Amino acid sequence: SSLQCQMMPLPPPLGVSGLSIQTDDETGARRWATRCFRDRRWHDGLVSVLPVLANLSDLHEGFAWVMVVGNGLAGIWALAAHRLESLRGRALWWFTAMVQLTIAVQVTMGVGMVAGQDIDPPQFHLFYGFVALVVVGIVYSYRQSLRPHRHLLYGYAGLFLMGLGIRAMLVAG
């Protein structure tokens, strides 16, 4: 016989019945009961909430390295492309856009943790994150006016964003 479970999002929406919060006596972990259907009978199954919350924090911390290393590589690539025409091309711009997008993802995850988990990060950590997001906007706005020097613009910006990311990680502890 097959087991089919429906997992509810955190926390369950208002008006949803049949769900309850239970505490595991050994770990003290809060768990939401889910409904599982087996052989046309309903059974209660438990899904832990804490790993989901811890995963967002771990994802934010791990993805910070993607942002730092990616922007550093994009910066080095763009600076090298300023000197060597063979390194220029669409791949450079796609990679640069992708790693700059990671900054927006990082800021979004950080805002989600502060708002949803009541985490109180150091103020300068927030400052560096939002400055990085603003820098991406400023660099993008200057791309046309500095077109002859765009490889230098994006090269130095990538290294600067890498430095902001490192600094944000250092003040976060």
Image (cartoon, rainbow, N blue to C red):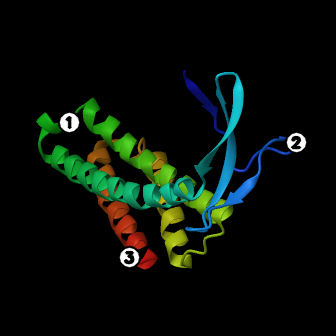
Occupied quadrant, residue 68? bottom left
Of residues 20 and 141, the one nearer the viewer is 20
Q: CA distance from mark 3 to mark 1?
A: 33 Å
Residue at 70%, 22% in the rendered image:
40
The Cα–Cα distance between marks 1 and 2, rounded to whole angstroms, is: 57 Å
Rendered view: 18 above or below 172: above
Give amino acid for label 3.
Answer: Leu
Of the numbered discs 1 and 2, the one sitting upstream in the chain is 2
Please report the residue visible at 50 percent of the width from the left and 72 percent of the height from the top.
Answer: 125
How would you rate the neighbour count of disc 1 (Cα within 10 Å): few for under 14, some for 14-19, many for 20 or more? Answer: some
Q: Which residue is mark 3?
A: 170
Say which quarter of the image contains residue 165: bottom left
> Is 137 situated above or below 29?
above
Numbered badge on residue 128: none
Quadrant where the N terminus sits is top right
Q: Nearer the viewer, residue 25 or 58?
A: 25
Which residue was labeled with disc 2? 15
Quick one: label 3 or label 1, which is nearer the N terminus? 1
The crowd level at tag 2 (other Cα within 10 Å; few <14, some 14-19, many 20+) is: few
Q: Residue at x 15, y 38 (%)?
A: 87
| Label 3 SS | helix
- Residue 5 in the image: x percent, y percent? 62, 32
Of the pair 96 and 43, the residue shown nearer to us? 43
State which quarter of the image contains the C terminus: bottom left
Residue 103, position as x, y percentages in the image: 45, 53
The amino acid beneath tag 1 is Arg
